[in-house]
Amino acid sequence: MPSGVIDQLEDFVWGKIDENEFLKKVIDDDALNNDGLLQKVEVIQDTLNAQLRKKVEANYPKLLDQVGAIEALDQMQSNFNAEMRLLFDRSGKIAEEFEKVQQKLLMDVETIENLHLMRRILGDGLRCEQLVTKLVESKHTDHLRRAEWVAELLMIRKENPSLIRISWMRDTFMYRIDELARNATAETVKSLREAMSSLSASEVATCLKALVHLSSRDSTIEQLVAETISNYDKTFLQLATTATDDQKATRQLTQIGHQLHATLEQFAMLGEDVALKMTKRLAKVITNRVQANADYAIKMVQTVLRVVGAHPTSIVSPLRDALSPLKQSILSQSLANLFTVVDNAFASPEVDEGSDSYDSLQRNAVVERVNSAMRQEVNSVAWDSNLRAEMEANVAKTLKYVGVKLEQSISLGGDSLKMTQRMTKRQQRNYDLLQAASDIADVWPAQLAAPLLLLIDGNVKTIVGSVEETANVVLDSMHTDEAIPKGRHVSPYVKELCEHLRNARSHFVPIHAILAKNQRMAIFVQHVLEQFLLHTTLRRPMTEQLEHAIAKDLEYLCENALLTFEGKGGHESKNIIDHYKEVAAYLRKSSLAKADPNHTPACLPLWVPIQLLISESESQLKSPHESTGWTIQEYVAWFNSHTDRERFHFFSTLLKSYNNSVIARNETEYVHNYPLILQLVEKGLSDTAK
């Protein structure tokens, strides 16, 4: 055996080593020598005995001194034990007495509990008997009081089920409780129905409180909702079967409207949550029973919307949502009908491809046919603002479709834009189509007819533009005719222009109403006169004789052509046509007077005297088109496509170029009109900078 385990044995005896740990080492040591271990134990024992004897011998005198004290303590312990035995015996007797008293108290308590239970049973029984008697005898008492009595009866029976086991109580009154509860519930429900029919809110509230006491509120409300929905389902089913008869359908829809209004008012008294529950289920019935393409759909929508408009949105919103498919069907069908009307109107014999024109009566008939159809559709939904707005959107689509038909029918190419003295049937048809479309659009707000008006305006601009283009061609011919008419004669180009404008005037008559809008005619006349002045002020040399001839041509042009266009704007107008005599007189004045703003007519653009003074100047100051190497046609095209400020910048550049050329030639004098022209250009730049 290794010396380690035996050496640790003494430490184990004195508790210096954990017992489990030491024993584990002993068990794990397969080479353990039992004899050696026993010998070690004996050695330790001998050592302990020797030490014990030594200690006893050393302390023996002291032990002898303690013998008396030990005997006294032993005597005291004996006395204490005797007293404790006596106390134990007395305590046992007291415990027995307490046990007897406790048993008696328990018996008394049980007796009292039984008496209390009997008293409670008797009290509850008497109370039940009293309540049953009241319920039987007081049939005219209000429902809330009777419901409270029934609720109390049911509560007593639930809390004290022993009552039913007492024969005299069971046979006397307990058997009647269920019957009385059923009767009270039935009477309350009946009164609730009557109160709802008479719209008595106070009575409805009382009945609802009574049903709460009877624990029948939810079931009763569910029954009322189910019955109401069932009735409406039958009504809508019957309506669908009689839809072919307009009179019957109208009568039924009127009845449905009155019935729905009453139903909403009745269920509103039951609470918003109940009313919403009913309308949700009713909305499903409407969705399932009323077909979107039904003949009476629009009347149905009208009837329901008129009713729901008088009730809170939070309650009737499901009904509005249920009408959405019907609304969409109405709008789709309405749009299809309007498109059909437009197709028929533009495909009618009056405007068919086989016919070249139609008179004003026929045109008015087409206009009235289309507008009447649109007005009828809008008026058919006037009772609902939202539906009316959507129907107006249909009108906008219809007007846009009119524009499509107009594009398909009108032809503004080739000979259709040639303004001859004799109007072709194709041209007459174009003008009549434009006027018809304009008459249709005029009835409706601009925001609805905007696409159609834009299309009409584009076609009118094309027609007027062709006249303006021809007028420019005629005006351009003046630059190749250098002869100045003498006496009272006028220039040949003016006569040709007047002839062209008179032809255009005859072509404008069919669309006069269109041209009269937004001062289109006045704008056209102003444009012709500005182009006349633009061309004439470019002629050189600008002699006094030529200026008088231009003034005479202007008066002739206005009096023999332009005045017939009704483009005058009145005394306060700044249109040239309204002050053409002043302009003619101005052309006859001297250069100095032309440069004076006080002598310049207010209607005359500032570029007119600038170009006129340039043309009156010596050849060293080039004409505007010559300064850039342009032809007159190129300059006119540039001039018409730029603003006044850009035009004045052009004139300023022209003067700077002229000034540089004078300096380059070392000349000291400028053309006579240079200061006047410079003053007008600076004024133009200043005015257009604002």
Image: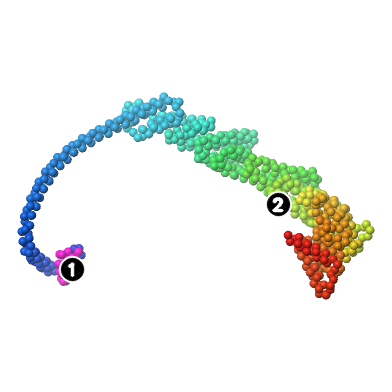
Q: Determine crowd level at label 1: few under 14, some 14-19, many 20+ residues with C-alpha closer than 10 A.
A: few
> What amino acid is at disc 2?
Pro
Which residue does the numbered mark 1 point to in the structure image?
Answer: 29
Residue 687 occupies quadrant: bottom right
Which residue is rendered at x = 19% and y = 67% of the image?
A: 25
Q: Residue at x 74, y 61 (%)?
A: 689
Left or right for 106, reference 267? left
Residue 15 in the magenta stretch? The answer is: yes
Could you tell me if residue 354 is visible in this image? Answer: no
Q: Label 2's element?
A: helix
Spot occupied by residue 54 in the image (x, y as percentages of width and height) = 7, 65
Q: Quadrant of residue 466?
A: bottom right
- Give, as a single range, the part of the protein colored magenta: 1-18
Quadrant of the snapshot with the N terminus: bottom left
Q: Position of residue 250 (x, y in %)?
A: 63, 35
**Does the magenta portion include 497?**
no
Q: CA distance from mark 1 to mark 2?
A: 113 Å
**Which of the two residues, 645 or 114, is positioned nearer the viewer here?**
645
Taking 426 as reference, is 141 left or right? left
Left or right of residue 171: residue 184:
right
Q: Is residue 76 above or below residue 111?
A: below
Q: Is residue 239 above or below residue 16?
A: above
Give the residue number, with chain letter if any, for mark 2. Answer: 451
Secondary structure under tag 1 reads: loop
Residue 297: x %, y % from top left: 62, 40
Q: Which mark identifies residue 58?
A: none
For residue 639, above or below residue 208: below
Q: Image point 9% across, 46% down: which residue?
A: 82
Which is in the foreground here, disc 1 or disc 2? 2
Hey, what amino acid is under mark 1?
Asp
Q: Is residue 380 visible?
A: yes
